[in-house]
Image (cartoon, rainbow, N blue to C red):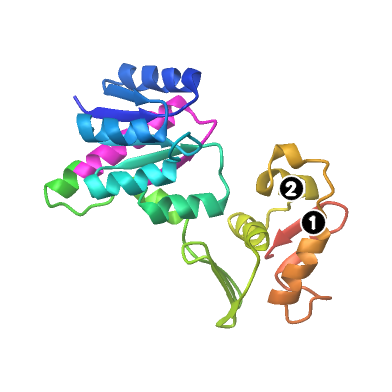
Amino acid sequence: MAKILLADDERSLCDAVRMILEDAGYEVVTASDGREAVELFQREQPDLAMLDVMMPRLDGFEVVEEIRKIRRNVPVLILSAKGDIVDKKRGFQVGADDYVVKPFDDDEIVLRVGALLRRAAMTSNGADDEEPSAAEARQLMQPVTIGDLVIDPRRYEVTVAGKSVTLTPKEFQILALMADHPGEVFTNEELVETIWGKEYTGEAISIPVYIRRIRLKIEKDPSRPEYLQTVWRFGYKLGA
């Protein structure tokens, strides 16, 4: 029976996920903060760690870094309410194997855990086949190319015709979000809610100003944009 370390300071959610995993046949040990998670990891030597990001004492990203010092190859899955590309990028950079955004489907969690454990078992046996979960995680970080424009979330880099473009964090988040859904129209409200958070909806955040600044950096002629286009009365989209 595989043992899973589950760390989340939200007790009700932690208990719910623990029950899901135990029903699936796993042994689960739980921690309510980051420091406790590291101590429990050292003591229990679990087969997989499942970590929330926002925890007291040490956050989930810091816990991943500590875990990697103890055991390099143990699978780590991050659970987070923060689903923007910048947070995902940091999660994978510090060594997470998968990243699931709350709220999530019970069956999805069980499937991802199973895939990570199978991949870890194959790796320990010298196999190098990839399971869908790991491939999907990397797919989230693949560069997106539209004409001469390339958005590379893994490197936190944007280039136009091979030349690097410097964006602010929020400008990059807006562009990366739209690159993840090419051709999809985003309203001002959707961009604010996704990038800044629901609590900022209705606040004085001027998306048109951000769009204009991005266009000045990526478009040959910002007044006639090829990449970041306005959909009249609806919002904005990236690409055709």
Q: Does the segment drawn in magenta span residue 174?
A: no
Q: Is residue 1 left or right of residue 17?
A: left
- The tag earlier along the polypeptide, 1 or 2, is 2
Residue occupying the point 67% across, 49% down: 195
Q: Count residues near mark 1 (Cα–Cα under 10 Å), then give few for <14, some for 14-19, many for 20+.
A: some
**Which contiguous range is marked in magenta?**
97-120
User: Height in image: 117 above or below 144?
Assistant: above
Residue occupying the point 14% across, 47% down: 124
Residue occupying the point 77% across, 63% down: 211
Residue, far front: 57
Q: Quadrant of the N terminus?
A: top left
Contact between marks 1 and 2 (CB within 8 A): the answer is: yes
Predominant SS along the magenta part: helix
Q: Is residue 88 left or right of residue 45?
A: right
Foreground residue among 169 and 98:
169
- Residue annotated with mark 1: 207
Instruction: Residue 192: give its label.
Output: 2
User: Height in image: 220 above or below 231?
Assistant: below
**The image quarter in which residue 237 lies:** bottom right
Q: Count residues near mark 2 (Cα–Cα under 10 Å), then give few for <14, some for 14-19, many for 20+.
A: many
Residue type at the position of mark 1: Ile
User: Height in image: 32 above or below 161?
Assistant: above
User: Height in image: 99 above or below 135?
Assistant: above
